[in-house]
Amino acid sequence: MPYHPIAPRFDLFQGCEIPGAGFGYVALQDIPKGTILLEDTPIFRLPEGITNEVVRNHLIRLPPTVQQQFMDLCIGYQYLNDGEYLGRFRANALPCGYDNVDGTGRKLAGLLLLAARFNHSCVPNVTFKWDSQAGVMRFCALSAISRAQELCIAYDVSSLLFTRDARRARLQGSSGFLCHCPACIIENRDSDDRRVALYKAIVQPPQRSPRETQIEFLSRRYAQICTALTLLRMEGLSHFRETLYFDGYKLCEEAGDRNNAMLWLAQASAAAATVGGPHNAEVTRRLQRANAELEAPNQRPQILRFPLP
Ligand SMILES: [Zn+2]
């Protein structure tokens, strides 16, 4: 059965001029956390390394109104040399899965006409995730959003765990603007320290050292995960919680703590539902696998308990 994306929730938000930031989306009313705001289908998806001519050939097959909407999009100065079609595509496309369903092919970027209008923030309140089964990009409220607040996504989620200077340099290089979001507007060393600690906990989780016992290592990692969850809250970040809760689940499994493993996994599922929408195929598969493991008999003796913080 063909999938029909939900219509954009223009009862909840609208496009308008944002002072100093061009066009953007603003909440028309209070929006609860987890609300699906938009499911956008790309007008085309293309791999890296394409030419201006390839983008033009895809565009001219589309209706004139769609072509016009594409040409109305901004083209950052850093993409001017790419040509008017490729430049606009590179400036506005978002990662949209792979060119085969099992995720082993080439990475694709997709041009989403409505979503291209979201501005960026390093404290994003909207997230997006590609749903390969449905062929749509799903945008959800990451946190409760107040009326009149701007709806912002993170153009580059991985750079959210960088310091302010590193984030701004990355964004200036990739998107051609100097970020003036609430996290970047003033220098904040405490925030930088928190994001560096988060990077270590999430991107570079520690390995057990030869001098450490398993119990010492698991305890150290548990403390790091609990601290990281607090730091995410302090930074106003909702991304990465699924990863941390999932790591907590794996830790419990290693420690033979089945009861707490179930609680960590339930939190990972709840966080995943907020970030990707409840129907995201990849996340669902990963959580289903973990749930199946929990139904198998526990082979490990319980050596530690790791309650949720
Ligand atoms: Zn910023």
Image (cartoon, rainbow, N blue to C red):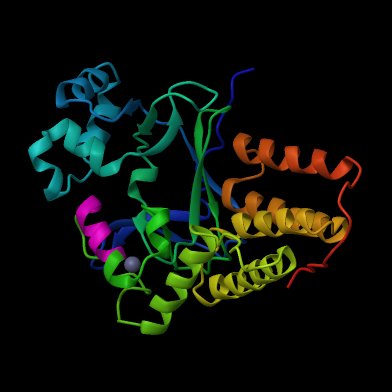
Please check the rendered image and state whether residue 169 is part of the magenta-colored stretch, yes or no: yes
Does the rendering let one see residue 34? no
Please check the rendered image and state whether residue 207 is part of the magenta-colored stretch, yes or no: no
Secondary structure that dominates the magenta span: helix
Does the rendering let one see residue 276? yes
Q: The C terminus appears in which quarter of the rendering?
A: bottom right
Q: Nearer the viewer, residue 246 or 180?
A: 246
Q: Position of residue 11 (x, y in %)?
A: 52, 52
Q: Nearer the viewer, residue 163 or 280?
A: 163
Q: Nearer the viewer, residue 29 or 107?
A: 107
Q: Is residue 159 left or right of residue 51?
A: right
Q: Residue at x 57, y 64 (%)?
A: 143
Q: The N terminus appears in which quarter of the rendering?
A: top right
Provide the residue span drawn in magenta.
167-175
Q: Position of residue 120 (x, y in %)?
A: 35, 58
Q: Residue at x 13, y 48 (%)?
A: 78
Q: Position of residue 146 (x, y in %)?
A: 53, 69
Q: Residue at x 50, y 33 (%)?
A: 136
For this orientation, the residue located farthest to the left is 81
